[in-house]
Image: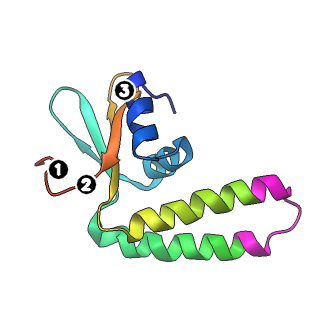
Amino acid sequence: MRLSKHAELRSSQRSISEEEIVVLAGIGLEIEQKGGTVLITVPKHEKSNWIRAIKEALRLLNAAHGISKRMLKRKRKVLKRLLERFCAKNQPYFIKNMDDGKVITCGHYSARSFNR
């Protein structure tokens, strides 16, 4: 996934890895906004389903054979961080441009988040 300079800066400030953005893009709900952008996040009502799915994926990953130790550690780290993010109060989101698919910014919902 391509990130703008602003998105790279924001993702490093908010400790959101590119792998997490890719997973969010795959499972998140796309909400069209003004100006040709799309907000991508996981809705609250689906959050518990994804938490269960991530826990199951971690369990299966721990039982997997034939994967290098380094790759296994990397995948486990990404899944654990996603699990922490979904269990937290403030959900992660990112905004991408509809035309070229480039990620513009990313962050976590707060009390002052946008209105839809």
Q: Is residue 77 above or below residue 106?
A: below
| Residue drawn at (42%, 62%) of the image | 85
Density class for disc 1 (Cα within 10 Å; few <14, some 14-19, many ≥20) is: few
**Circle 3: element type:** helix
Residue 68: give x, y in percent of width and height: 86, 55
Q: CA distance from mark 1 to mark 2?
A: 6 Å
User: Where is mark 3, residue-wise?
Assistant: 6
User: Where is mark 2, residue-wise?
Assistant: 109
Q: Earlier in the sequence, mark 1 or mark 3?
A: 3
Which portion, as a residue range, is magenta? 61-72
Mark 1 residue type? Ser
Mark 2 residue type? Tyr
The answer to whether residue 88 is magenta is no
| Residue drawn at (28%, 38%) of the image | 38
User: Is residue 89 shown left or right of residue 8?
Assistant: left
**Circle 2: element type:** loop
Residue 56: give x, y in percent of width and height: 60, 76
The answer to whether residue 66 is magenta is yes
User: Is residue 7 shown left or right of residue 22?
Assistant: left
Closer-to-camera residue (107/98): 107
Q: Earlier in the sequence, mark 3 or mark 2?
A: 3
Badges 1 and 2: C-beta atoms under 8 Å apart? yes
| Residue drawn at (53%, 41%) of the image | 18
Q: Single out the residue that lies furthest toward the left.
A: 115
Residue 88: give x, y in percent of width and height: 36, 68
Q: CA distance from mark 3 to mark 2?
A: 18 Å
Q: Is residue 86 above or below residue 26?
A: below
User: Where is mark 1, residue-wise?
Assistant: 113
Residue 3 falls in image quadrant: top left
Mark 3 residue type? His
Residue 49 falls in image quadrant: bottom left
